[in-house]
Amino acid sequence: MDKGKRGLWFATSLIVFLAVWETVCRLLAIPSFILPPPSSVLQALWELREALFGVHLWATLQEVLIGLSISIVFGSLLAYAMNRSRIVERIVYPYIVISQTIPIIALSPVFILWFGYDISGKIAVTVLFTFFPIVVNTYDGLRGTDREMIRLLQTMGATPWQIFTKLQLPSSLPTFFSGLKVAATYSVSGATIGEWLGASEGLGYFGRRASGNFQAPALFASILLLSLLGMLLFWFAGYIGQRYMPHAPVSKKIKK
Amino acid sequence: MNEKLAFSQVDFAYGERNILSSFDLVVNKGDFVSVIGPSGIGKSTLFQLAAGLLQPRAGEMRIDGVSTKERLGKIGYMPQSDALMPWRTVVENAALPLEIQGCPKKEAQRRVRDELPRYGLSEWADAYPHELSGGMKQRVSFLRALLFGSDIMLLDEPFSALDGITRLELQEWLLQMWRETGSTMILITHDMDEAILLANRVILLAGAPITAPVEREVPIPYPRSTSSRNLPAFLNLREEIWGLLRQASGSRVQEGVAHG
């Protein structure tokens, strides 16, 4: 199936879904504070546009972007150090495996406790959510470099640094970008949870307050924006990946 | 002195498993030598020793008559898989050894572009490896090994993954490249026909550990082509090598039974 056809199917099913939702809400007279019809969600989005876009979206976006950047920089550095030194790898790797099994949500209050209720607390929680997918994927990519290729470069007289820049770094990019895609969606969850735990602005804070006041349309409007933010970041990570890997035969296959 | 690469009294083992024991082999300048033997006997080990990826436990390795431990960066190596980088185009892949030697990227790529027509690759200069056929990938891999600038090349079963027709084409093409460059070639192969057709000398490896390799001159003058396979001299040699190989693998089986 080509891309256009796929898009058409998606658009059609989405319209049908929204129409059914709207109809059911009206026919069964479901109270708006339980399930608002899409039309009132859009209406809320429009009426609250100044607060939503001017204050809360902006606040969340800041937390997400700063948190994600910190994770990218330090996550990649840690992956590099693990690849470079066996000792670092031996020490760090078990913790990374363990970190995959503990519920990071449970750790979030600790980070708020340490980093406070201002923006740094939310950034810390975002980093908590996004750090490990980046480390794990980047490290796997670096470690998974073709042995025969490394040997070939050695026979050419390449230095370890040349082997790293010309071979290991580019061959780890595909897994780095799949880690980045995961981290991009996690980052929105991280910021949201950070805001739930204590904040005065941001879409997570806004949604929680709306929920407390039974303002379901406003709550749904904030969820919609958070979802769109996640999708946008996911798409953007994928887009950069495509730009840097023009050969990417894998993604071409998926499209077909 | 005409000697290009020499193994002299070389011992090598992986842990307890002896691969080479007092092994001697001399390859002369401009030779085309085929190395053939049962699988798992240590043909690739021989190459890794020659290229400097491994060091012998005892004995010495000489390049141009000089005993040296630092062989990395002196011998061109064409690995079994094409080992092309999927994120680099044909030109960028072939330019890799020049870049490693410190040649600026632009200059390196210009030199590669000058070479491409000889390899029938001009139209594919900016293609990525996944767009190429198996035969084209091997030619890029060969060009890369050649641009490395060494006058000795190790070819590790370069055609084993190709279909029969492409293999025949590339064998003739390789003979032509050898004539044009005058390089010393050492080829590992599983294919007796390939071993005889290309080389002026066939080396048979047998035994565990390998001690004295069996050598046979190929009494067929160059230039050769695919049809050289039908010459009586070719067929006789093929028969003889086949006998030796069967003997070698037979003794290995018996050893296995005795040990088991």
Image (spheres, helix red, strand yellow):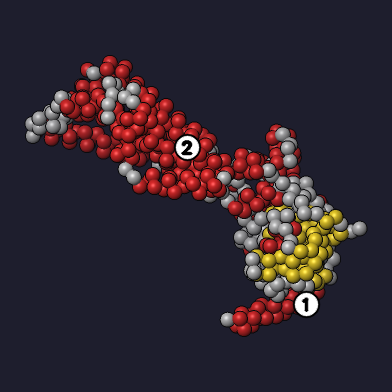
Q: Is residue B192 left or right of residue B181?
A: left
CB-based contact (under 8 Å), mark 2 and mark 1: no
Q: Which residue reaches farthest front?
A: A114
Would you name the residue on which mark 2 appears? A75
Q: Nearer the viewer, mark 2 or mark 1?
A: 2
Examine the image and state in which quarter residue B235 appears.
bottom right
Quarter of the image with the N terminus of chain B is: bottom right
Amino acid on which disc 1 is placed: Asn
Residue at left 26%, top 29%? A196
Residue under label 1: B236
Q: Secondary structure at mark 2?
A: helix
Residue drawn at point x = 80 percent, y = 67 percent: B9
Distance from the alpha carbon under mark 2 to that under mark 1: 64 Å
Which image quadrant for residue B27?
A: bottom right
Q: Is residue A14 above or below residue B7?
A: above
Q: Is residue A219 above or below residue B119?
A: above
Residue B62: give x, y in percent of width and height.
82, 58
Residue B49: horizontal and vertical position, in percent?
A: 72, 59
The residue sitting at 24% across, 34% down in the picture is A15
Q: Residue at x 10, y 30 (%)?
A: A31
Residue B20 vs A50, above or below: the answer is below
Left or right placement of residue A204 versus residue B200 in this view: left
Q: Position of residue A233 (x, y in %)?
A: 39, 31
**How far across and how far down the image is residue A142, in percent?**
54, 45
Whether residue B41 is visible, yes or no, is yes
The answer for which chain carries disc 1 is B
Kind of residue indicated by mark 2: Gly
- Disc 1 is placed on an element classified as helix
In this view, the residue in front, B244 or A145, is: A145
Residue B111 picture quarter:
top right
